[in-house]
Image (spheres, rainbow, N blue to C red):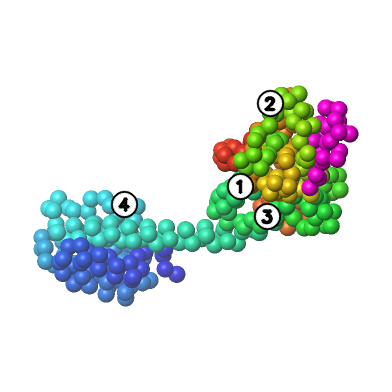
Amino acid sequence: MRDPTFPSQSDFAMLGLAIAREDGRNALMALAPAYRLFSTTRAWTHQHARGRLAGVRIGAESGGRSRQAARLGWSKLQTFSKATAEVVTSSGDEAGELFREGSMRMRSLLAVKIGIGVMLLVAQGRAAQAAEIKGLGVVPLKTSLDVLGPQFERATAHKLMINYAGSSDLIRQFAAGETFDVALVWPAMIDRLLKEGKVAAGTRADIARVAIGVAVKKGAPKPDIGTADAFKRTLLNVKSVSHSTEGASGTYFKSLLERLGIVAEMQPKLRPMAGGPLVVGPVARGEVELAVITIPFILVDPGAELVGPLPQELQQYVVYTAGVSAAAKQPDAARALIRHLTSAAAASVIKSNGLEPVTP
């Protein structure tokens, strides 16, 4: 078996070519005797090979103390970590210069080959561990995940496949047994899935929160909603208000009407919609005067305009929460995704998309 520290024939060939190219001398001819000697002595020990090579005049053109320079040069080649050390003897022998430069070139070539090999091994390892993560998520998280998702894929080689839907559709999908690795929904939904054994215990994590806002058709006059009393008057004055049927914002809005004491007056005006994506559309088309929904839904619809968030004394933040499926095919990859979404690096992306990151 060949000693791995012993240079191969191809290494000698590259050494000769490198020296020839760099110096423009007939260095290849000078190295030919050493190459021929090496090719017939593969089984030699280092000591024997060094002794034989020491007797070869590879620096025939330079004369002088070439034998000593050859011996020192070969010693440096055998120990690659010292390949860049001074090879020239006290006489400044030209053959020693050639050997020194050749060893440096060889080391560079070997470093490149090793680097490429390491990268290939890393790439193969990542490919072998790559997972396809299936997610079910709420629409307000989409714009953030459109940025954070590709970052995660590049860092891990995992592939994300997330289906976004409104709250009513998501409830039906979970109830029907839709498979998923990670759920990106709202706290009550995660709690329900935990209770049903569909989300693994200990994987629940809050990702972001968002305020509830009010929308009107783009270009329409913006009503006063600056205080609780002003918001109440606006609701009583409009002819129609759309909201989410089963989502967190819709559930809160209906409780808010009770708190304001105007349930009876508002009941004929309410236009419940199956999920956030459908709440703003009627307002953008001019079919409904007002929409009450989380702010990201308003910002993504070009036909609607944000009036503002609910008054501070009436505001209720909607939290978006993640959980890993108890039957996840890729539980470790799903956990890694949640860690990425709750990291400090993800906070700025979440904030830039109208949400507030939740600090653990």
Asked if residue 342 can be seen in this view, the reply is no
What residue is disc 2 on?
Answer: 226
Q: Can you tell which of label 1 and label 4 is closer to the viewer?
A: 1
**Which SS class for mark 4?**
helix
Give the class, few, some or many, for how many residues have Cα within 10 Å of label 3's Cα (few <14, many ≥20): many
Query: What separation in Å lies between label 2 and label 4 (alpha carbons)?
Result: 76 Å
Q: Earlier in the sequence, mark 2 or mark 1?
A: 2
What residue is disc 3 on?
Answer: 162
Tell me the kind of residue under disc 4: Lys
* Residue 131 x %, y %: 64, 58
What residue is disc 4 on?
Answer: 82
* Residue 79 x %, y %: 34, 56
Query: What separation in Å lies between label 1 and label 4 (alpha carbons)?
Result: 67 Å
Q: Which residues are magenta?
A: 246-273
**Which SS class for mark 1?**
loop
For image coordinates 32% across by 58% down, the residue present is 108
Tell me the kind of residue under disc 1: Pro
Residue 143 lies left or right of residue 213; in this view the side is: left
Q: Earlier in the sequence, mark 2 or mark 4?
A: 4
Q: Is residue 53 positioned above or below 330 on the image?
A: below
Q: Can you tell which of label 2 and label 3 is closer to the viewer?
A: 2
The tag on residue 302 is 1
